Image: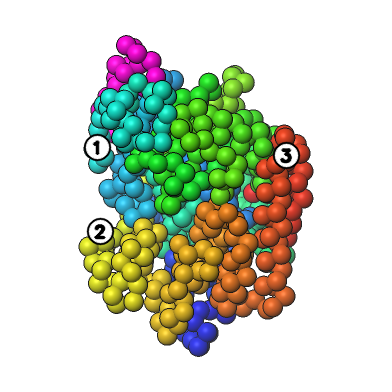
Amino acid sequence: MRCWRPETPEEECHVAESQANPARLGPLKREEDWQRLGKETFDLVVIGGGVVGAGVALDAATRGLRVALVEARDLASGTSSRSSKLFHGGLRYLEQLEFGLVREALKERELMLTTLAPHLVKPVSFLYPLTKRVWERPYTAAGLFLYDSMGGARSVPGQKHLTRAGALRMVPALKRNALIGGIRYYDAQADDARHTMTVARTAAHYGAIVRTSTQVVGFLREADRISGVRVRDVEDGRETEIQASAVINCTGVWTDELQRLSGGRGRFRVRASKGVHIVVPRDRIVSESGLILRTEKSVLFVIPWGNHWIVGTTDTDWNLDLAHPAATKHDIDYILEHVNTVLATPLTHDDIEGVYAGLRPLLAGESEETSKLSREHAVARVAPGLVAIAGGKYTTYRVMAADAVDAAAVDLPGRPQSSITEKVPLLGADGYHALVNQADHVAAQHGLHPYRVRHLLNRYGSMVHEVLALADGRPELLKPIEHAPDYLGVEVVYAAAYEGALHLEDVLARRTRISIEYPHRGRECAEQVARLMGEVLGWPEETVKREIEVYNARVDAEVESQSQPNDEAADALRSAAPEARGGLTEPVS
C-alpha cells in the first residue's frame, strides 16, 4: 500500500497522514492503527461503525478517554446508510404520546442545523395534504403547533396553512381530488452515510482510533469481567487482542448476536424492521415541497434528494440476513400503490432509478406491529466491562452516545468528564458559511462552476480545499465521473486517501450515492472508480478486476431480488452474491 500523492516519499506521507492529520483515514494510518490496537490499553473499545458507534467514539474522545472503534465492514454499511435521510422530531410520535422523544429529537435537529453540521444537514419542507373536512385541519394544526413549540420552529419556518388551490400550486403533481387543503411544515435532511463517516472522522481528529474491516471474533475476560476484544483484520486475516477497561456494543440489529458471542445474557432484545425506499427522477413528481402521506400502518414520505425523490418507507419484520436486507417486488409495489393514490401522473417500475432496504433496530415489545415498537433507546451494563445500547433513531444518536459512555463510566479508571459534543462541530462545519459566500472565488480558483463548488461544500464543508488540493497537477481529476456526472474524479481519490474507503462498494454505495442515484446503479462507472481507488490503495490489475466483478455481482443480485415476490426468495438471491470483504465470519459485527 502507498499513500497519495504517488511522488511523495513514503516517510513524509506517513508523518503527514498520522500526525499532522489524524482524521485522514488512509492506508498508512490504517496500518499504524493496527499496531496500536495490539500494543496499547484503551479506556473504551466501541464495536460498530454506524452513527451510534461513531457518536460514542466522538463523545468518549472529546471527554479525554482513549478510544478505539472497530467495524467489521465499512462505516455506515448497515442501517446508517439506509435510512429516510431525515433529521426530524418524528411528527407521528406525538400521536403515540412520546413527547420526550420528540422534544429531544427536535433539540438535536436544531443543533445539527445551526452548530454541529450545517454543511451536511439542511432544512426541507413537507406538505401534509388534508383529506377530511371539519376536524382534520385543527387536529393536525394542534399537533404541528406542539411540534413547533417544542423547538421545531427555531431555525426553520413554522407551519403554513394552505387552501386546496394553494397546496396544488405548491405541489402540482397531486390529484385535485386527493386533498381539500394542506399544511406545510419543515424538518431537516442529510446524507446519512456521509454524516456518519464525518462523525467517525471527527472522532479520529480528537484522538480515537477508527478502523474498518476489523471484526470482533471474541471477548477477553479477566476473572468475571470483560477486559477487551479479539479482532481479525478481514482484509488479510491477521488477529490481535485489544485491552480495554470497557467495551460498548453499538451494533444495532446485531446487538443480540454480539451479546451471545460475549457469553452473557442481554437485558433487552432487538427486533429488525425492514424499511424499503425507492429513488425516482425529480421530473417525475412536479413539486416545490416534499410530501408526508398517511398509510394504514404508518406514514409515507416523498423526500427531495438533489435531482431525485426518495419515496418510502415500508415497515415489516425481518428475520433473515442482517447484512443484506433485500427489497421485494411486493415492497416496491406497496410504495408505488400508496404514493400513486395522490399523484396525477402515477409512478411506474420504469421510473425507478434506485432501491435500498435497511433494518431498524427496534427494542422488542409486546406489540406485534413493528411500527408501534418504541423508538426510545435503551442502555444496559450487561456484564462488568460490557455495555450495550440499542433502539433509538438516527436523529438522537448524540444523546444515545452520551448515555452509553455514562453507563460505561463505572468500569473506567477515574471519573470521566461530562459529555461536551453539543459544543463540538463536525469536521467541515467551521468556516462553512464563509466559504458559501466565497463559492464564486473558490470556483474561479479551481476552474469549476460555482454550482459545482456549492455541491462540494454541502458534502465536505470547509474540507473542500483539502479535497481539491488532491487535483493539483492533475486537472483531469476535476472532471465529472463518466456516467455519474454529479461527482468529480477527485472525490473518489479523496474517499480512498482520507475517508477510509477500502472497496469499490464503499465509494459507489456510501462515499457517493451513485448506487441509488443512477439507473445503472454504478455498473457503468465501476471501472473508472476502481482504477482511481487503485492508484491510492496500490491495487494490482487483478484486484481492480475483482473489485469490479464483486460490485457488479452485488448489483445484479439486488436488482434480481427486487423482482421476487417474498422476503425468502429475495434474500436467497441477495445473500448469494460475493462479499467485498471475503474474510468476514459469522456472527458479523
Q: Verify whether residue 149 appears in magenta.
A: yes
Q: CA distance from mark 3 to mark 2?
A: 47 Å
Give the residue at x 53% y 38%.
347
Residue 83 at x, y percent in the picture: 51, 42
Q: Quadrant of residue 128?
A: top left
- Camera-near label (1 vs 3) is 3
- Camera-near label (2 vs 1) is 1
Residue 176 at x, y percent in the picture: 39, 26
Q: Amino acid at mark 3?
A: Gln
Tag 3 and tag 2, C-beta contact below 8 Å: no
- Camera-near label (3 vs 2) is 3
Answer few, some or many: residues within 10 Å of disc 1's Cα (few below 14, many 20 plus, some between 14 and 19): some
Looking at the picture, tell me which residue is in the foreground, 86 or 43: 86
Give the residue at x 72% y 75%.
542
Q: Verify whether residue 29 appears in magenta.
A: no
Tag 1 and tag 3, C-beta contact below 8 Å: no
Q: Is residue 46 above or below residue 35?
A: above
Reading the image, the residue beneath label 1 is 157
Q: CA distance from mark 1 to mark 3?
A: 43 Å
Reading the image, the residue beneath label 3 is 564
